[in-house]
């Protein structure tokens, strides 16, 4: 299943709830303010890193760029995708859940 | 509303401000000025160019007192006062010059 | 009769009493309209000759993050507008240390925002001050008007 999250992990529990409920092997795509979860050295970094052992985490490139998060500020191992990659993920997964 | 120059149509809002920032060129400024019976001199263009640069850098059209101070700093004290700017742009330097520069109405201008 | 404390009264050039206004920014940029609305209110309010400051707490600190580039997402780049605050004489931007820490940020990661002091021959001075939560709490207490965005 593809899970999309769009809320900042510092301002909402959406990501935490999503990570708690996502089955192993899920794809998790961070978009809009949720891309802050892709930053290294933050209060939620360890939560995201531990989720990466069972799920694949993606982040939308244009949303990262809009927020000034370059690859040097990111957790390594998070996959960057463009809008085409977003569509690809939505098509290859049988279901999509948006954690609004 | 809209006007046409050399076969190209330019959309404006109801107050005559250009709808699309990227449509702007010097002919557009000239046409707007002609409609106000204003002859654009070097001094007018200097302010228009200043405003376009300011917008490019900060994404806003400056309020009149900000414009006045910034002009004074960059183009000299003799130009950084409201008398000089109102003589060039009698309808209000921020409003009229921003319009010719193809910018939206200044932020903080009611 | 009620005693009036005149010691804190400040009068501006037009003879009006100056109030201390603080705009508190708590939202990340781009995801919601709050930061843009707040910034517009600050710029418009700057015309009224009051004692204005801005505080950035929680996700609000992300508004000042360096290198924001919205070209690919088709949004206007609001981040650039913070650079004009100095021209509008908004020169006190307080950023909470604890909020930076939680987000793995330091002063160096923020935009270099400055203002030019006309009284000192346009000397460039930094606008951003990093303050502790306790200091910010004191600053909030000193305000006459606090607006949240």
Image (spheres, rainbow, N blue to C red):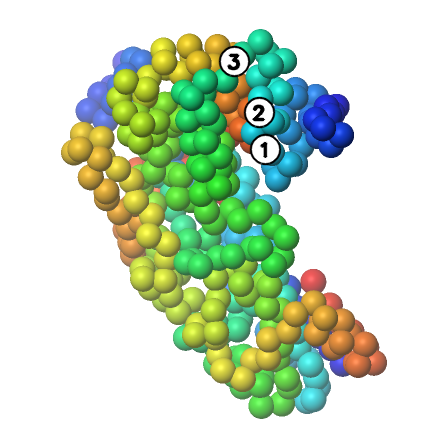
Question: How dense is the environment of label 2, judged by Cα within 10 Å: few (below 14), some, or many (20 and up)?
Answer: many
Q: Secondary structure at mark 3?
A: loop
- Spatial distance from mark 3 to mark 2, Cα to Cα? 11 Å
Picture coordinates of residue C129, whole percent (x, y): 28, 50
Which residue is disc 1 drawn over? B25
- Spatial distance from mark 2 to mark 1, Cα to Cα? 7 Å
Q: Earlier in the sequence, mark 3 or mark 2?
A: 2
Q: Secondary structure at mark 2?
A: helix
Proximity of marks 1 and 3: CB atoms separated by less than 8 Å: no
Which residue is disc 3 drawn over? B39
Which residue is disc 2 drawn over? B29
Confirm whether residue C36 shows in the render. yes
Determine if marks 2 and 1 fall on one subunit: yes
Locate the C terminus of chain B by quadrant. top right
Does residue B88 sit above or below A12 in this rendering?
Answer: above
Tell me the chain of label 1.
Answer: B
Question: How dense is the environment of label 1, judged by Cα within 10 Å: few (below 14), some, or many (20 and up)?
Answer: few
Proximity of marks 2 and 1: CB atoms separated by less than 8 Å: yes
Question: How dense is the environment of label 3, judged by Cα within 10 Å: few (below 14), some, or many (20 and up)?
Answer: few
Residue at (33, 48) in percent of width and height: C113
- Spatial distance from mark 1 to mark 3, Cα to Cα? 16 Å
Q: Secondary structure at mark 1?
A: loop
Does residue B55 sit above or below A90 in this rendering?
Answer: above
Q: Where, by quadrant of the figure, is residue B3 drawn?
A: top right
Determine if marks 3 and 2 fall on one subunit: yes
């Amino acid at each position: 299943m593809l899970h999309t999250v769009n809320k900042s992990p510092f301002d909402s529990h959406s990501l935490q709830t999503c990570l708690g409920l996502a089955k192993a092997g899920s794809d998790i795509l961070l978009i809009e303010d949720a891309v802050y979860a892709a930053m290294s050295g933050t209060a939620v970094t360890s939560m995201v890193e531990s989720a990466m052992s069972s799920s694949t985490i993606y982040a939308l490139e244009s949303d990262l760029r809009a927020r000034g998060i370059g690859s040097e500020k990111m957790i390594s191992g998070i996959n960057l995708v463009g809008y085409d990659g977003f569509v690809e993920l939505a098509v290859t997964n049988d279901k999509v859940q948006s954690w609004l | 509303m809209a006007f046409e120059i050399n076969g190209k149509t330019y959309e404006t809002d109801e107050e005559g401000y250009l709808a699309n920032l990227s449509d702007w060129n010097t002919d557009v400024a000239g046409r707007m000025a002609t409609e106000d019976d204003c002859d654009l001199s070097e001094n007018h263009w200097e302010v228009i160019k200043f405003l376009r640069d300011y917008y490019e850098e900060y994404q806003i059209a400056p309020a009149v007192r900000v414009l006045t101070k910034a002009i004074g700093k960059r183009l000299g004290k003799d130009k950084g006062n409201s008398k000089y700017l109102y003589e060039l742009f009698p309808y209000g330097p921020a409003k009229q010059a921003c319009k010719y520069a193809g910018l939206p109405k200044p932020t903080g201008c009611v | 009769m009620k005693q009036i404390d005149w010691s804190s009264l400040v009068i501006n050039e037009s003879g009006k009493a100056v109030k201390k206004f603080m705009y508190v920014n708590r939202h990340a940029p781009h995801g919601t309209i709050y930061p843009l609305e707040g910034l517009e209110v600050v710029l418009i309010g700057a015309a009224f000759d009051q004692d204005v400051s801005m505080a950035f707490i929680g996700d609000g600190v992300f508004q000042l993050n360096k290198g924001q580039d919205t070209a690919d997402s088709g949004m206007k780049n609001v981040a650039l507008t913070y650079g004009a605050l100095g021209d509008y004489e908004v020169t006190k931007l307080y950023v909470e240390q604890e909020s930076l820490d939680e987000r793995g940020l330091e002063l160096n990661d923020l935009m270099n925002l400055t203002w030019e002091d006309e009284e000192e021959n346009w000397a460039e001075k930094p606008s951003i001050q990093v303050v502790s939560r306790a200091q910010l709490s004191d600053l909030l207490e000193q305000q006459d008007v606090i607006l949240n965005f």
